[in-house]
Image (cartoon, grey):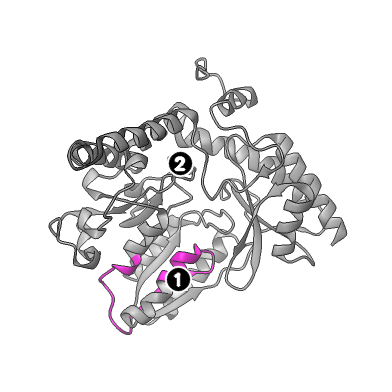
Amino acid sequence: MSFPVLADGAARDEAWWRQVAAFYPAPPDAIVNLEHGYFGAMASPVQAAFEQAVRYTNEQLSPFVRGEFTRTHVDILRQRLAALIHAEPHEILLTRSGTESMQVLITQYQGLAPGDTVLWSNLDYPATRTAMRWLAQGRGVTSTQVTLRLPIGDDEIIACYAQAMRQAVRPKLLLLSQVTPANGQQLPLRALIALAREHGIDIVLDSAHALGQVALDVRAMDVDFAGFNLHKWLGAPPGLGFVYIRAAQLHKIEPHFGDDDYPLDDIRCRLHMGMPPISAILAAPAALDFHERLGGTPAKNERLAWLRNYWVERVAQLPGVRILSPLDAVRGTALVAFAIDGMDARALQQALLQRFGIFTVERNIGDTDIVRATVAVTTTTAELDRLVAALEVLGNEA
C-alpha cells in the first residue's frame, strides 16, 4: 500500500484523506467513535514498528535495554521531540503520559512556601486540578480555582484570570491548558502569559491536547514548563509522554524523591521512571515520521477544523442544543463540548451510545458535566451526519 503523494500545489482534499484512512484500522461497524481525544489510533507503519519493538526487546532483553537502547534510542527520541517543540534535547524528559508529565511539574515545583497562592481553572484536566489542590496540604499554600463559565470568549477568560491574579495573596504558580480538555478551547496564551509575568507568577502549561493538533513553539510562547503526551494527536503507542523544562529554570523543579542517578543539572533526575516504556520509545520515531508525511501539524489542524465545522455549524442551529466550545474554529479544536437543555450529561451520553451507536464522553467542568465529541483526521462525513441527526432527535425530545 503506497502513501498518497500530492502533486505540487495540490490540496489535501476528501479523496486524499480517504486514501490516508486506509493506513488506519477499520472502525467497528456497530459504533461510531467520536472520542478520539482519549488516544488516537496508530497508523499501520507505527503499529508495525511497535510490534517489531516488542518482539525485538523480548528477544534481546537486558543486554539491549541496558546498552544500545539506553545509550542511543532514548536520546534519538529526545532530539526529535525537542525539534518538534523548538526546544533543546537536554530540556526534554521522557515520561509515561501527559498526566505524569504535569504531576512532575506541579508536585515537584520548589518555589512555594506556606501562604503562597496557586491558581488553576475548572476547565483544566481533572488530574491536574487534583495535583494543584494537593499543593494546599503538601506545601501549605492556598489553592484557588478560577471559574470559567461555558461558553466563554477570550476577553472574559483574560478578565477572569486577571482578577484572580490581582486578588491572590502572594500568587506564585498558575496552571494553564493550551487546549482545554473539557471543550477544546484554545486559551489566549500570549495575553495570559504576559499577565502572569507582570505578577511574577510561574506557569505550568498542559499541552496534552495541543501537540500535533495546533501550532506549538515553546520559545515563541515564552514557556518555561510544559507537559505533553504522544498518544493523542501524534498517533504514537499509548504509554509515552514528555516534560519540557527551560534549562535556565530547571532548578525550580526538584529531583524525583531525591533521585541521584543523574546530577542536579540533568533533567533526567526529575523522574525516576524505573522500567521505561521501551517498545513505545522505539516506535515513537515512526509515529513522528508518519505525522510529517501527513503534512505535520498544519495539515492536521486544517483537516480537523474542517471536520469540526462540518457538524458544529449545523448543530449550532438546532433547537435545544447548546455548543459550549468556540464557534470560531480559530479558537476551537477537534474537541467540542455540547449540552441539550433539560437533559443531564450522563443521560445524553448514554442516549447517543445506546440509541444511535455514537460513542462520546462525559466530562466534568467543576460544577457541572458536559458531553464532548472529538473527531480524528479519519472521521467521515457520514459519521458526523449521524451525530447531527441524533442530536436533532434528542433536542426535539427534551
Mark yes or no: residue 202 visible. no
Label 1 or label 2, whichever comes before in sequence order: 1
In the rendered image, residue 197, in percent from the top left (x then y), is placed at 34, 65
Badge 1 marks a residue whose secondary structure is helix
Residue under numbered circle 2:
212
Q: Is residue 254 magenta?
A: no
Q: Is residue 119 magenta?
A: yes
Q: What residue span does the magenta drawing correspond to?
A: 106-131
Name above or below for residue 240 compared with residue 142: above
Question: Residue flagged by tag 2: what amino acid is it?
Answer: Gly
Q: Nearer the viewer, residue 273 or 102?
A: 273
Give the residue displayed 57% in from the left and 71% down from the top: 366
**Image side of residue 358 versus residue 3, left or right:** right
In the rendered image, residue 273, in percent from the top left (x then y), is placed at 28, 55
State yes or no: discs 1 and 2 in contact (Cβ < 8 Å): no
Give the residue displayed 46% in from the left and 37% down from the top: 297
Residue under numbered circle 1:
130
The number of callouts visible is 2
